[in-house]
Image: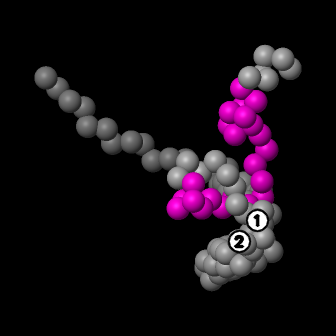
Amino acid sequence: MTTRDPYSKNFDIALAVRPAFALYAFKRESYQAKNVAADSGFTNDIRALIERTMHQWRDPGDPRVTGRGSAFDQEPPIDPDFVPSPSKKKILTF
């Protein structure tokens, strides 16, 4: 596409497929345009963040971590015989 060529960098920043991990070094680059997650110097940081996130999901029993991720694909239970009670709206008179 020739019309995209002058805007290729900005187009990719806004609309390109995102990487699995994103990590930005604020002190090195305050604009957060360079993802440093792929740099070998940040491997330990990425592992620590993954473990911290998994710990926060595992403790309360998040279905994505406990193997019950299909729970998000199910519809909530609905009683077909449920009839809501009539609302008690207060009618304002002026």
Density class for disc 1 (Cα within 10 Å; few <14, some 14-19, many ≥20) is few
- Which amino acid is tagged 1? Asp
Circle 2 SS class = helix
Position of the C terminus by quadrant: top left
Question: Where residue 72 sits: x, y (%)?
Answer: 73, 59
Q: Quadrant of residue 76?
A: bottom right
Is 32 one of the magenta-colored residues? no
Name the residue at the right extreme. Answer: 1
Viewer-proximal residue, 7 or 19?
7
Residue bearing the label numbered 1:
39
Residue bearing the label numbered 2:
42
Is residue 77 among the parts visible in the rendering?
no
Q: Which colour scheme is used?
A: one colour
Question: Where residue 90 sits: x, y (%)?
Answer: 26, 37
Position of the N terminus by quadrant: top right
- Which amino acid is tagged 2? Phe
Does the residue at mark 2 contact the one at mark 1 (Cβ under 8 Å)? yes
Instruction: Answer above or below: position of 26 versus 52.
Output: above
Viewer-proximal residue, 13 or 88?
13
Boundaries of the magenta span: 7-29
- Judged left or right of residue 84, residue 4 is right
User: What secondary structure prevails in the magenta region?
Assistant: loop
Q: Which residue is drawn at 76% across and 30% down?
A: 8
Q: Residue at x 77, y 54 (%)?
A: 19
Circle 1 SS class = loop
